[in-house]
Image (cartoon, grey):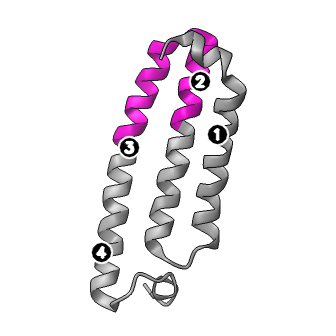
Amino acid sequence: MSPNVWIEHYRLISTGAGVLFTAGLYCIFASHDLIRVVVGIEMLTKAVTLMLALAGALTGRMATAEAFIITLIVVEVVVIAVATGLVVGIFKHHGSARVKFIKRLRG
């Protein structure tokens, strides 16, 4: 995408990022399933990635924005891998990936 496309459609892109962010928050706070929580975290990071790209295009600093986006993707992959490992471990131990099993943990 050329930077002009970002600038011409910044309202649409920022609205889409806002919808993604809101849907991610809803998945995290309203869900009782851990897999949906992980998907919500993924949606939040995608919204932040989209806003970083938009900010870089609007300010003319795409190189800096791309560096931040690559760093965010690396951090996101690590977080999602750890979270998915925890969900799989909870599923193997309890036979379900529900949030109520985490609430009963003591330690």
Marks 1/3: CA–CA distance? 22 Å
Q: Is mark 1 on a helix, strand or loop?
A: helix
- The circle drawn on residue 88 is 4
Label 3 vs label 2, nearer the camera: 2
Residue located beneath label 1 in the image: 16
Q: Residue shown at 72%/27% (left/top)?
A: 11
Question: Which comes before the other along the chain, label 1 or label 3?
Answer: 1
| Label 2 crowd (10 A; few <14 / some 14-19 / many >=20) | many
Marks 1/2: CA–CA distance? 11 Å
> Can residue 55 be found in the magenta stretch?
yes
- The circle drawn on residue 39 is none
Q: Is mark 3 on a helix, strand or loop?
A: helix
Q: What element carries label 4?
A: helix
Question: Which comes before the other along the chain, label 4 or label 1?
Answer: 1
Residue located beneath label 2 in the image: 54
| Label 1 crowd (10 A; few <14 / some 14-19 / many >=20) | some
Magenta span: 49-75
Q: Where, quadrant-wise, is the C terminus in this rendering?
A: bottom left
Q: Which amino acid does label 4 sit on?
A: Val
Residue 30 occupies quadrant: bottom right
In the drawing, does residue 61 fall left or right of residue 91? Answer: right
Label 1 vs label 2, nearer the camera: 1
In the drawing, does residue 102 fall left or right of residue 83? Answer: right
Disc 1, disc 3: CB below 8 Å? no
